[in-house]
Image (spheres, rainbow, N blue to C red):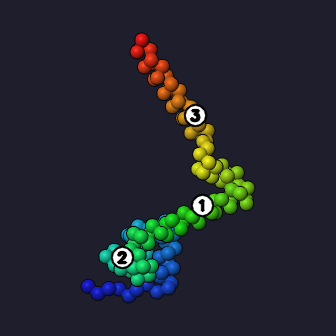
Amino acid sequence: MQRPDPWNDGQIEKVRNLLTKFCNDAATVCAVMGCRKGDLNWLCRQAFDMSFNETAKKFELEGKAILKMAYFDAAVKDKNSKALDLMAREHLDMLGPVERRRKVKAEADARAEREKAEEVDF
């Protein structure tokens, strides 16, 4: 079977946008781009010098970086308290109220189990 024509600049940008926006499964890309799964690796190698999986991972990471930067800007520059709270929890290992209650309960349960085990030893 004959190879398809390589993607043009507009198509390359469309693929980049799809992958950066987490639409990174082969079926989705094929549906949008009108290509076959069997041609994806070849098309990506022509456009990006990488296999489809490598290309998808690269642009997924770029998408995550863009999202984190926007989140940071919302938290810090725009003083969005919800965004700040969520970023602090994620990056400073801070716990929200639900997580804090779960942690306290787990610690109490573990302490009770240790005390119970110590009572059995005597």
> What amino acid is labelled 1 in the image?
Lys
Along the viewing direction, whichever of 107 and 100 lies nearer the viewer = 107
Camera sees residue 35: no
Q: Earlier in the sequence, mark 1 or mark 2?
A: 2
The residue labelled by disc 3 is 101
Q: Which quadrant holds the N terminus?
A: bottom left
Q: Is residue 108 above or below residue 88?
A: above
The residue labelled by disc 2 is 41
The residue labelled by disc 1 is 68
Separation of disc 2 and disc 3 at Cα? 48 Å
> What amino acid is labelled 2 in the image?
Asn
Q: Which quadrant holds the C terminus?
A: top left
Q: Earlier in the sequence, mark 3 or mark 1?
A: 1
Separation of disc 3 and disc 1 at Cα? 27 Å
Measured from the top left, where is residue 75 in percent x and y? 68, 56
The answer to whether residue 64 is left or right of residue 52 is right
Separation of disc 1 and disc 2 at Cα? 29 Å
Q: Is residue 31 above or below residue 83?
A: below
Which type of secondary structure does the marked residue at label 1 adopt? helix
Furthest-front residue in this view: 122
The answer to whether residue 68 is left or right of residue 32 is right
